[in-house]
Amino acid sequence: MEYKDYYKVLDVDRSASQEDIKKAYRKLARKYHPDVSKEANAEDKFKEVGEAYEVLRDKEKRAQYDQFGSNYRHGQSFNTPPGWDDQAGGFGGGNFSSFFENMFGGGMGGGPGGRRDNFFAAGEDVNAKITVTLEDAFNGATKTIRRPTGAAQTGTINVKIPAGITSGKKIRLAGQGKAGAGGQDGDLYLEVNIGPHRLFRLEDKDVYLDLPIAPWEAALGAKVTVPTLAGKINLTIPAGAKSGQKMRLKGRGLPAKEPGDEFVVLQIMTPPADSDKAKKLYQQMAEELAFNPRESLE
């Protein structure tokens, strides 16, 4: 039986990384795929490439293959040593070459062809979460994250956060899920969570801001500066404003075809009576204004 050099089939060095092996396989699988290739021997090449990848993509199989491949001479007959079939652990598959069958044994699991029947299958989708700031959701951003466990590749990936995204929405990254076995890789779906903000509360596309105001600003009216996600603006507080009153800033929420609004919630803050002067002023107000805040309860 002639030795099969799987590294040569994939055109990679024997020291090639798993990532290099995967890239080489995907390139050749596209080249020789029977549905698209015009090569005369495309189907045979496609099967040969798939067989090589089946061995080299698996660390255990690759190690066993390398154990007996280091001393071969190209083109020589290859015979597995006594007892090898027992060591191989049943990696084989009915539709692979005789070299593969002899090296790894028969029966990759269940029925004729075993795993070979499902080898050229698409990868599974992977779901993960990403937390972004409210400013990122408002302006849009590009974030660099570490790929989640189960993704087709390791390392980091850049994720584009679209302006106006809301919590619970998912960003789809095509081909970044689990690796496919001959078919396309699965997709990565990132569920967006918008983190808490020190000033604003978010409700869908609308943002809320609690705005502290002084009693005289509420009573007499005032012009004050308030923050928005797009920067500070001037806001007119109407005379006679009440605590809890909402003032709507149209279109100042998250951007969208119909953008959200910003709601400024007025909060009247009472100055502390922490000096003789402050106490005197409060006493004077009590005597001269004759104000009863519980009148409606009587």
Image (tube, helix red, strand yellow):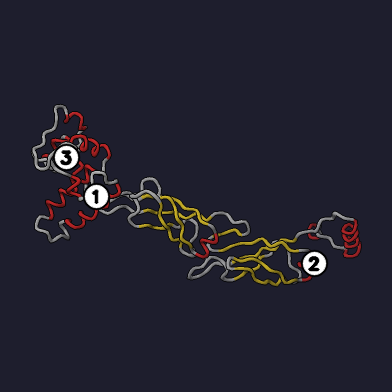
Asked if residue 259 is positioned above or below residue 152 in the image, the reply reads below
At x 32%, y 52%, the residue is: 186
At x 57%, y 59%, the residue is: 202
At x 47%, y 55%, the residue is: 192
Mark 1 lies on a secondary structure that is: loop
Estimate the spatial distance between the alpha carbons at disc 3 and disc 2, rounded to whole Å.
Answer: 85 Å
Image quadrant where one finds the C terminus: bottom right
> Amino acid under label 3?
Gly
Nearest to viewer (mark 3 / mark 2): 3
Q: Residue furthest top?
A: 83
**Badge number at residue 93:** 3
| Left or right position of 7 against 210 | left
Q: Within the image, what quadrant is residue 228 found in?
A: bottom right
Q: Do residues under tags 1 and 2 come within 8 Å of each other at their CB atoms?
A: no
Mark 2 lies on a secondary structure that is: helix
- The mark that comes first in sequence, 1 or 3, is 3
76 or 127: nearer the eye? 76
213 or 132: nearer the eye? 132
Q: Which residue is mark 1?
A: 121
Asked if residue 287 is positioned above or below residue 70 in the image, the reply reads below
